[in-house]
Amino acid sequence: MTTHTSHSPSHDISAWRDQYRLTHTFHLSLGTNEPIAGQVESTLKRSQAKVDKWVISRRGGFYDHCITVEGIGDESARELRKEFANLNGEIKVHVEHMVHFAGAAAHR
């Protein structure tokens, strides 16, 4: 009788955390008659996400908010997207999840 052992890879990524940075960019589009920047800011504070960049631009009758945050995971970012969408029935929200690698390879 032969015994085979197999090694399954660990899903623990803690050893890799210092080699990359995870950010999430939220794209919010809403009408100019819907001033909700204060509500968006309050929602971000409750989530404990660190705002890296927040750009607001006006396009026709709409404001586009592009907010890049870090300090939260993918699941928290999805929940935050839902919270933003629930602030107002007219708001459109899209989120991008980005991984930024550290070291020389990231600068090429």
Image (cartoon, rainbow, N blue to C red):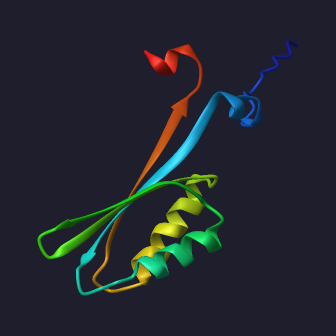
Indicate the position of residue 21 as horizontal and vertical percent values: 59, 38
Looking at the image, residue 38 lies above or below residue 8:
below
Indicate the position of residue 39 as horizontal and vertical percent values: 48, 81
Q: Is residue 75 left or right of residue 14?
A: left
Residue located 61% across and 53% down the image:
73
Residue located 61% across and 60% down the image:
49
Q: Please identify the quadrant where the C terminus is shown.
A: top left
Residue located 62% across and 69% down the image:
47
Indicate the position of residue 72 as horizontal and vertical percent values: 62, 55
Indicate the position of residue 25 as horizontal and vertical percent values: 43, 53
Q: Is residue 53 left or right of residue 51?
A: left
Residue nearest the viewer, comparing 42 with 2:
42
Q: Quadrant of residue 95?
A: bottom left
Residue located 61% across and 71% down the image:
45
Q: How many marks?
A: 0
Q: Quadrant of residue 22?
A: top right
Q: Is residue 36 left or right of residue 1?
A: left
Looking at the image, residue 75 lies above or below residue 102:
below
Q: Please identify the quadrant where the N terminus is shown.
A: top right
Q: Is residue 106 left or right of residue 71?
A: left
Q: Quadrant of residue 88?
A: bottom left
Looking at the image, residue 35 lies above or below residue 63:
below
Q: Residue furthest left?
A: 60
